Image (cartoon, rainbow, N blue to C red):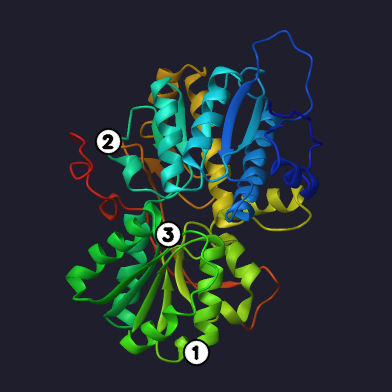
């Protein structure tokens, strides 16, 4: 049985470490009331394992969205609660936790996941029980039939969007001879497909496609093979610790002397963990970087709230998705005036919002969030502080043309 506790207003590292061992209920202190029960948001994410750092920041940011909603008065006095569960980066575990959240904890919404396959398992359970699920992990498949349903929303970007934007930028600047090194599961495969789709009209030449298992700790045998091919670009289509280790070993091997390393999703947390030298000169895409606050007012407001709650730190890219995913379903409930599924779905469809990075909207056919993406380069010098890790090279604006077409996903329109 999941352990429950009521944390203080500030979510501390101690609480997050506890969450990595058991399921937790994250909520503000209870307030006596005779009204309806609180709005409960189930939040399955991998609090343990290779993506734990990213997942823990998703919890922090999701809690921030809940706190803001409650501070604003909630929904006619109904407050929100966040119920985080460790899905252990395992589809079966995620399905079990999601079922418990729906049937035992009586959640109104599900938000979360940090893996393509895990989110599909969560979505399957939620849609069978007519519960809205807002995914905060990259996937093309979740937008497409037969996995998609009317209760499925996707706040995260898709690999087609992400790799497409990064590929269009990189192939035009750094060269067209490309090697792909990808994690051997849905995330890696979809990122490679996105790069190929962007590169085909530009005439890229794929020299090799190398795959590795999730959780690989040694890429050293691959580096000589890659170097011998003399690629202009090495596209690293992996995530979390896998990405950190691959980047560091490519740097140590000296691959950067002849090859530009490009990553579809370059992680703020990974850059902090691996350090400036390992990531020096690496280019990639991100759905959010705190440094855009100088030009995006909603980013500045979000960053300031995070700083106030969490000891002056700044949010990560995937953490910000946790914030947006939770805030979106709560905004939908507020617009609908209820948590009833059909009415909240109708309120979310086509909803235009700017929570933290600029204007977004949910596309009608598949409920995909149409949003901007930022092309960044990792810094190794001239940093104003430890969080100043990226330079923003370009912004790929929110545009439905960057998405897979509705027809390609199997939708009527």
In the rendering, at what x and y percent does residue 43 appear? 58, 35
In the rendering, at what x and y percent does residue 369 appear? 39, 44
Q: Is residue 51 above or below residue 222?
A: above
Left or right: residue 148 versus residue 319 is left
Mark with earlier residue (3, 2): 2
Residue occupying the point 59% across, 65% down: 270
Residue occupying the point 60% across, 57% down: 316
Tag 3 residue = 373
Left or right: residue 329 versus residue 316 is left
- The residue sitting at the top extreme is 34
Residue 52 visible from this viewpoint = yes
Left or right: residue 126 versus residue 366 is right
- The residue sitting at the bottom extreme is 257
Q: Which mark is residue 254?
A: 1
Few, some or many residues within 10 Å of mark 1 (<14, 14–19, 20+): few
Q: Is residue 375 above or below residue 75?
A: below
Q: Quarter holding the N terminus?
A: top right
Q: Quarter holding the C terminus?
A: top left
Question: Who is closer to the viewer here, 95 or 70?
Answer: 95
Q: Is residue 75 above or below residue 145?
A: above
Tag 2 residue = 365
Q: Secondary structure at mark 1?
A: loop
Residue occupying the point 82% across, 36% down: 8
Asked if labels 3 and 1 touch by Cβ distance under 8 angstroms, the answer is no
Few, some or many residues within 10 Å of mark 3 (<14, 14–19, 20+): many
Mark with earlier residue (1, 3): 1
Q: CA distance from mark 1 to mark 2?
A: 46 Å
- The residue sitting at the front extreme is 221
Q: Is residue 161 above or below residue 210?
A: above
Left or right: residue 401 versus residue 107 is left
Q: Depth-wise, is mark 1 or mark 2 nearer the camera?
A: 1
Residue 347 visible from this viewpoint = no
């Amino acid at each position: 049985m999941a352990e429950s506790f009521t944390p203080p207003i500030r979510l501390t590292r101690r609480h997050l470490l506890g969450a990595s061992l058991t399921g937790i209920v994250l909520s503000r202190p209870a307030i006596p009331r005779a009204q309806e029960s609180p709005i409960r948001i189930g939040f399955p994410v991998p609090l343990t394992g290779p993506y734990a750092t990213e997942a823990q920041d998703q919890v922090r940011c999701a809690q921030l969205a809940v706190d803001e909603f409650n501070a604003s008065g909630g929904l006619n006095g109904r407050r929100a609660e966040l119920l985080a569960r460790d899905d252990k980066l395992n589809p079966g575990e995620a399905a079990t936790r999601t079922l418990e959240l729906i049937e035992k904890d009586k959640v109104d919404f599900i938000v979360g996941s940090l893996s393509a396959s895990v989110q599909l398992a969560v979505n399957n359970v939620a849609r069978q029980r007519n519960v809205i699920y807002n995914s905060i992990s990259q996937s093309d498949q979740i937008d497409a039939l037969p996995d998609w349903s009317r209760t499925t929303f996707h706040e995260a970007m898709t690999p087609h969007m992400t790799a497409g934007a990064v590929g269009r930028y990189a192939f035009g600047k750094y060269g067209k001879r490309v090697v792909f090194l990808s994690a051997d599961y849905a995330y890696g495969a979809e990122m490679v497909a996105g790069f190929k789709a962007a590169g085909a009209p530009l005439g890229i030449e794929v020299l090799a496609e190398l795959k590795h298992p999730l959780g690989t700790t040694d890429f050293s045998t691959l580096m000589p093979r890659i170097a011998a091919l003399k690629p202009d670009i090495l596209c690293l289509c992996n995530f979390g610790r896998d990405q950190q280790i691959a980047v560091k070993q490519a740097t140590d091997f000296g691959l950067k002397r002849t090859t530009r390393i490009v990553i579809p999703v370059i992680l703020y947390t990974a850059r902090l963990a691996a350090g400036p030298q390992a990531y020096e000169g690496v280019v990639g895409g991100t759905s959010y970087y705190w440094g855009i606050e100088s030009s995006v007012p909603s980013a500045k407001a979000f960053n300031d709230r995070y700083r106030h709650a969490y000891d002056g730190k700044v949010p990560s890219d995937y953490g910000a998705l946790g914030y947006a995913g939770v805030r979106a379903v709560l905004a939908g409930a507020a617009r609908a005036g209820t948590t009833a599924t059909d009415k909240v779905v109708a309120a979310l469809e086509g909803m235009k919002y700017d929570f933290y990075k600029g204007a977004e909207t949910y596309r009608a056919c598949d409920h995909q969030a149409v949003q901007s993406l930022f092309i960044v380069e990792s810094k190794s010098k001239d940093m104003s502080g430890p969080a100043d890790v990226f330079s923003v090279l370009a912004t790929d604006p929110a545009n439905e043309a960057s998405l897979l077409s509705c027809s390609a996903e199997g939708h009527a329109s």
